[in-house]
Amino acid sequence: MSAIGELLDGGVRLAIPLAVASAGELVSERAGVLNLSVDGMMLTAAFAGAVGAHTTGSAVAGVLCALVAALLVALIQAVLSVTLRADQIVTGIAANALALGATTYGARLYFTEGRAVPGFDRLAIPVLSDIPVVGRALFAQTALGYLAVALAVLLAVVFSHRTGWGLAISAIGEDALTADRSGLPVKAFRYAAVLITGAASGLAGAHLALADVHAFTDNITAGAGYLAVVAVIAGKWRPWPTLLACLLFGIAQALQFAAPALGIHVPTAVLVMSPYLLAVLAVSGLVGASRAPAGLTQPFLREAKA
């Protein structure tokens, strides 16, 4: 495989968890709820998935455990953000810190004899996977990777601005009070949006542990959840630009491994920090002006009837 092919293969593999997590986060932010806890959801899911797969010997069981764990974190986030109207930024950062500490401690207790777990192997699609340069990157992923991409595309289509559900969450994210007056169940939609983020993040976390390295390591996300949130901002709260931003971040991450083959000789530290440098540039507005949903992070409180 050529050096460019290896870079694309690694970039797509690393972009898949970002893409599915950001697809879920996009739904939530358009509904007015910012989930900075995406990284914590992914990390919790990765740990639960590894434990589940290690205990049962089944990678599929590990994915189910990952989804349940991430949904529990998402439910807590929804209760705090939607019902209790807590500060969404503070609760998200706290959830990430708690997830990092809990999973690190849990790994010390559980994985005492090694951290290798059953996982998913690559599933090459005949003929298509042999296409030069892009074949292996696009058509030789794992079954879990294909599922994650399918979910990301499904969320982008179902909650687009051309569907009833997409228009409903956009209306809630822009002006929850007006949406409530029109009869939309604001809290129900916001709960559903946060839980969708949880399911998407759970699949992303499972992909990190079971389709990427077949193991759990401390802080396996390495800030991937934050990159997923930034991708939504870089994509200007639109599905396809958001997915493109995820691919860019994935290629930036893969560059640290493919750089020698490409003849790029820069300090390793610079390559490691490159995805996060791109993230800073994305949120600084240098990629173009954008406007977040007007009601993002704003708690909803129904007006009292006269």
Image (cartoon, rainbow, N blue to C red):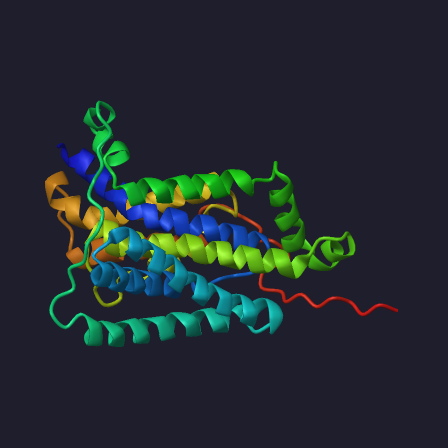
Could you tell me which residue is drawn at 12 percent across and 66 percent down?
114
Say how many tags the image has. 0
Q: Quadrant of residue 69?
A: bottom left
In the image, residue 7 lies at what x, y percent?
A: 21, 40
Residue 230 in sight from this viewpoint: no
Taking 290 as reference, is 146 above or below it?
above
Q: Position of residue 12 (x, y in %)?
A: 28, 41
Q: Percent position (x, y) of residue 207?
A: 29, 51
Name the residue located 40 percent from the left edge and 48 percent from the top edge: 20
Report whether residue 17 is seen: yes
| Percent of width and height locating residue 155 | 49, 43
The quarter of the picture where the C terminus appears is bottom right
Residue 121, image quadrant: top left
User: Is 89 placed above or below 134 here?
Assistant: below
Which of 294 and 55 lies nearest the eye of the viewer?
55
Instruction: Give me the residue at 22% from left, 50% from top.
Output: 212
